[in-house]
Image: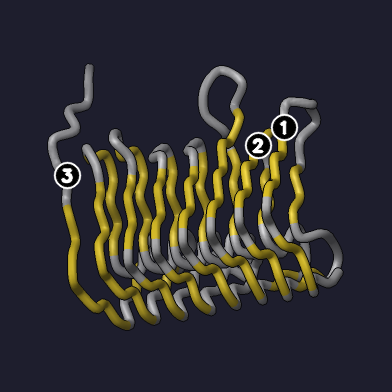
Amino acid sequence: FEKAYTIEPSVKNMIMENGSSGAGGFMYMVAMNGLAIDNVQFIGGVSGWEGGAIYANGIANGVTIQKSKFENNSGGMGGALFINEADTKIQATQFLNNDASAFYGGAITVAYSSLGIVDSTLDGNTGGAIHTFGGTGATAIVPVRIEHSTLSNNETDSGASVIRSESSMHLTMINTTISGNENASGPAIAMYTGDNLSKVVIAYSTFYGNTS
């Protein structure tokens, strides 16, 4: 049996406020061909567990988000976004004051997916900024690439204030600022894995004012 992915929604030029759901405070998207978000504001979404604003699972051609804002959303895992099995590209987007303090990923959680972030800001998120696990491909490696972005003033009581990966991760960070992030009991970036497959490349980036 082959699942047919025929739906590819595109959401543009909207403001969504005060949504609430068990998963995905505003959007619950499963088994679709693709998902595109352009110039949308998600404000004050609440999820009982995953994805305070958006829950996306099994998006065949991936998720693209640009020129958007996620602010004051909350969920147990992925304060703004929870993405599973959907390679995700984010550009020119703000993640501000989202909360996943019950678990991890104050702004974003991605599972079994790649993540690319360009020209974006992740600021003031609780539960850390980014949480990844699962990996993709035969070696279960999570590819994360961050360019020309700012990750600042994110905080957590455990794990990592900026990026927590529970699988091997290939992290590339270019022209990015990591500042003012706070972790009560650990680092800004942490990879919890028992193998030696992880790689980190950081170029032309600035780290300052991060505390542990």
Q: Residue at x 52, y 29 (%)?
A: 136
Q: Residue at x 16, y 51 (%)?
A: 9
The picture places residue 14, in percent across and down from the top left corner, at 20, 74
Q: Residue at x 29, y 34 (%)?
A: 60
Quadrant location of the N terminus in the rendered image: top left
Q: Bin the neighbour count of mark 2 within 10 Å (Cα to Cα): few under 14, some 14-19, many 20 and up.
A: many
Quadrant in which residue 52 is drawn: bottom left
Q: Which residue is mark 1?
A: 198
Task: Name the amino acid, label 1.
Answer: Ser
Q: Bin the neighbour count of mark 1 within 10 Å (Cα to Cα): few under 14, some 14-19, many 20 and up.
A: some
Asked if 103 appears above or below 62 in the picture, the reply is below
Asked if 111 appears above or below 126 in the picture, the reply is above
- Structural distance between the alpha carbons of marks 1 and 3: 33 Å
- Structural distance between the alpha carbons of marks 3 and 2: 29 Å
Q: Bin the neighbour count of mark 3 within 10 Å (Cα to Cα): few under 14, some 14-19, many 20 and up.
A: some
The picture places residue 95, in percent across and down from the top left corner, at 48, 70
Front residue (pair 160, 152): 152
Task: Name the amino acid, label 3.
Answer: Glu
Task: Name the amino acid, label 2.
Answer: Met
Asked if 165 appears above or below 134 in the picture, the reply is below
* 174 with respect to 190 (left or right): left
Which mark sits nearer the N-terminus, 3 or 2?
A: 3
